[in-house]
Image (cartoon, rainbow, N blue to C red):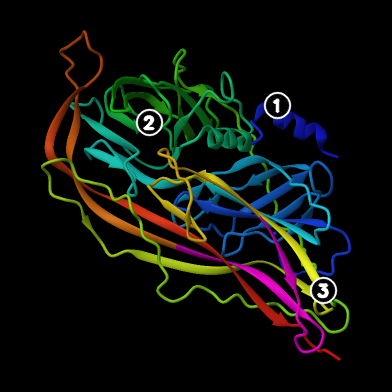
Amino acid sequence: MKLSRLAAFLLSTVASIGPAIAGAQQPELRVSVVTYDDLLRPVPGTLVQIEPSMGATANLVTDLSGATAWTTQTPGDLAVVTLGETTSALGITLGQTHVLSMPTVALGTDVSVLDRSYVQPAARPVFVSSRAPITRDAHHDRWAIKSIENGDLSVQFQSNIAMLLTGIEIQALAAYQGVQFGGPADQYAVGLLVRAPSVNLGDHTFVLEIDCQGHGFSAAPIADCYSIPIGGAPTTANWSATVFDWTDDRAAMLLKGSLVRGDNLILFKPSGVQRDASLLAASPPSLVPPTTPEDGGGPSGNGEDCIPTCPGVASGEHCSPDSPPASSPGCDEATIEEPFCGSQSRMIFYVCSSVPNTPKLVERRWVAGGSVTVGYKVKVNGVESSVSSTGQWQEHAAVSTTYIAQVGDGCGQCMAECENYTSCRLVYEVTRDRKTWRWAPENINWPFPYLRTDPCADIHTEMDGCVSFGIGDAICNRLNCP
């Protein structure tokens, strides 16, 4: 029993189906976890731990489709799900810890499956330099680090930077790291994580801009700062982020002091007292390689089960992004590159019956959630999902399907449900007015930089994309029939 740990977790965090399923005598719940980065690309190699309040802990790893093997869980139970940090093509997907409420299983169901998908923000590699006028993410314009003209230092360093676009993501990160931020757990709506070496930023070197659109701020937010050191822990954190300009839901803040070697977080709340950097001692989990996955296979009656082959995604399959970024008025129009699309197919589950015309009732639930860092469009079986202005995406579907095996080669069939996944990305070159911050040390009455606008001087790339999920079926005849 792990109720004490689970209860403690619930107090500090907002609480927020497989290879062969054959011949089940009692209704069972099978659970798989799927991980995506914030471009909604599957992340293979993620260590996943499912720790139920009842039963054994499952240690798993995601495959090339981003999915773990299936485990049997207790219907109606609560479990702690931990997603490890993983190095991916996009950067480092940040570790998260969530509470997962297992669904109940309806009477008469042969098998119930839960396909739980999570989005982990990716900390992308970014080289920050005071010699560059603007440092930003190559995929979007939600944040930008701008060097200050007449700044006091020449600074450059390699970092990994991630946007935390929801309070749930902030809390899931804190739970994974084993830290508690000051004040209520749900006070922060958006944030930025900078994983960096120990570096002195000076007092007038960088301005950080954050797009807060859609996060509910009616006035300039308050920025609180935290440092989670890695290795040789310092005894103090001495840096701050002070919001001094608020225009069109975009906050500009002056960065001052020395970042700590590790994770430096800037979190935004609607009101209260600004908190300069606080040092937090982390205790992230030690995830272990996976235990032997369950397969639930083996003989079922006369003959042997087969494994259906999913049909895969049709050649040339694509989806269509529909929210392209635009240049500033009077500047050259945005230009677009050819879209890049990729597809794959994975089996969700299969169920076998050795007795023809015997119905098998399978209840499938798909729960997905997180946020994406570009204006993605998401479709499920041709129906567009809701993606908010902040990038938050939620999907919840429950379907009961009755599978009826035919005679096959004489001893029944195995029937599978398959998921087809297609992702397309478009890269745009956009031209915007460059807004430059300038330090005027002679003006002692205003300790912040001034803004200067250079028309059409900022040329950079941004991205738009879409993802389509489709569900299909596959059947095979059972083998070695008498």
179 relative to 374, above or below: above
Q: Which residue corresponds to mark 1?
A: 11
Q: Amino acid at mark 3?
A: Thr
Q: Is residue 404 found inside the magenta-colored segment of the image?
A: yes
- Kindly report the secondary structure that dominates the magenta region of the rendered protein: strand
Q: Crowding near pointer 1: few (<14 within 10 Å), some, many (20+)? A: few
Q: Which residue corresponds to mark 2?
A: 212
Are the two marked residues, 2 and 3, in contact with CB atoms closer than 8 angstroms?
Answer: no
Q: Marks 2/3: CA distance?
A: 55 Å
In the picture provided, is 73 more to the left or to the right than 33? right
Which quarter of the figure has residue 318? bottom left
Q: Marks 2/1: CA distance?
A: 28 Å
In the picture provided, is 240 more to the left or to the right than 457? right
The residue at 68%/48% (across/down) is: 287
Q: Amino acid at mark 1?
A: Leu
Q: Position of residue 160 (x, y in %)?
A: 42, 43
Badge number at residue 358: 3
Q: Crowding near pointer 2: few (<14 within 10 Å), some, many (20+)? A: many
Identity of the residue furthest to the top in this view: 445
Q: Quadrant of the N terminus?
A: top right
The residue at 81%/82% (across/down) is: 304
N-terminal of the two: label 2 or label 3? 2
Q: Amino acid at mark 2?
A: Cys
Q: Position of residue 420 (x, y in %)?
A: 53, 67
Q: In the structure shown, which secondary structural element does the residue marked by tag 2 occupy?
A: loop
Magenta residues, as a range?
Answer: 399-422
Which quarter of the figure has residue 163? top left
Q: Marks 1/3: CA distance?
A: 47 Å
Q: Position of residue 90 (x, y in %)?
A: 44, 53
